[in-house]
Image (tube, helix red, strand yellow):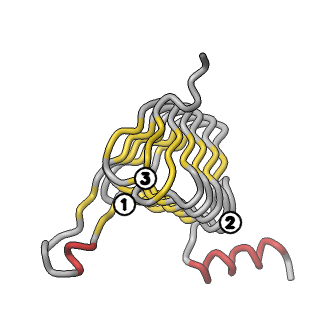
Amino acid sequence: MNLKIFEKLFFKLISNKKNPYHPLVWIGGKPKIGKNVYIGGFSEVNAKGAKILIGDNCDIASFVSINVADSHKRCIEKKNKINYESIKIENNVFIGSHSVILGGVKIGHHSVIGAGTVVRKGKIPPYSLVIGNPCKIKKNYYKKS
């Protein structure tokens, strides 16, 4: 089968738009993604309902979810609507595999989000190491002395 035909059928089947990162990266809405950014397969960048800004020179591993939407309170009937909050990831940030970045987060430049980390609302200072769930922030971990 012709590769172009296969590719067209494949994207139709998985309900995904072609993107410059990986065929199995789902991008929703219109996030602003900087230069020299890598996004690994099976990752999601969902900017439907709020803004996502990803700076230059970022490396986002496979199986990462970056999502502005939070529907848990609507689902359990505590609110009538989905909550949307913007996300900002500054330049030179690494986000490890199987991490989750939720709405209301700002990650400072030259920071590392360890594999499996869940980052909820708040500001991560530049040069930080962030690990775990709930996440622990090691400020200035990567700051040059």
> In terms of depth relative to the viewer, which is nearer, 40 or 20?
40
Q: For label 2, count other residues whose C-alpha is less than 10 Å away and answer few (under 14), some (14-19) or many (20+).
A: some
Q: Can residue 124 be seen in the rendering of this structure?
A: yes
Could you give the CA–CA distance between mark 1 and mark 3, rounded to whole angstroms?
25 Å
User: Which label number is shown at residue 23?
Assistant: 2
Compared to 21, does 6 lie above or below? below
- Quadrant position of the C terminus in the picture: top right
Report the amino acid beneath label 1. Lys
Residue 74: percent from left, percent from top: 20, 75
Residue 94: percent from left, percent from top: 60, 44
The reply to whether the C-beta atoms of the residues labelled 3 and 2 are less than 8 Å apart is no
Disc 2 on helix, strand or loop? loop
Disc 1 on helix, strand or loop? loop
Compared to 73, does 135 lie above or below? above
Could you give the CA–CA distance between mark 1 and mark 2, rounded to whole angstroms?
20 Å
The mark nearer the N terminus, 1 or 3, is 1
> In terms of depth relative to the viewer, which is nearer, 105 or 9?
105
- Residue visible at 44% across and 55% down in the picture: 101
Judged by depth in the image, the label closer to the viewer, 3 or 2, is: 3
- Residue visible at 51% across and 51% down in the picture: 131
The reply to whether the C-beta atoms of the residues labelled 1 and 3 are less than 8 Å apart is no
Residue wearing tag 3: 135
- Residue visible at 76% across and 77% down in the picture: 5
Report the amino acid beneath label 3. Cys
Residue wearing tag 1: 48
Q: Quadrant of residue 17?
A: bottom right
Report the amino acid beneath label 2. Pro
Q: For label 3, count other residues whose C-alpha is less than 10 Å away and answer few (under 14), some (14-19) or many (20+).
A: some
Q: Quadrant of residue 42?
A: bottom right
Could you give the CA–CA distance between mark 3 and mark 2, rounded to whole angstroms?
30 Å
- Residue visible at 57% across and 42% down in the picture: 112
The mark nearer the N terminus, 1 or 2, is 2
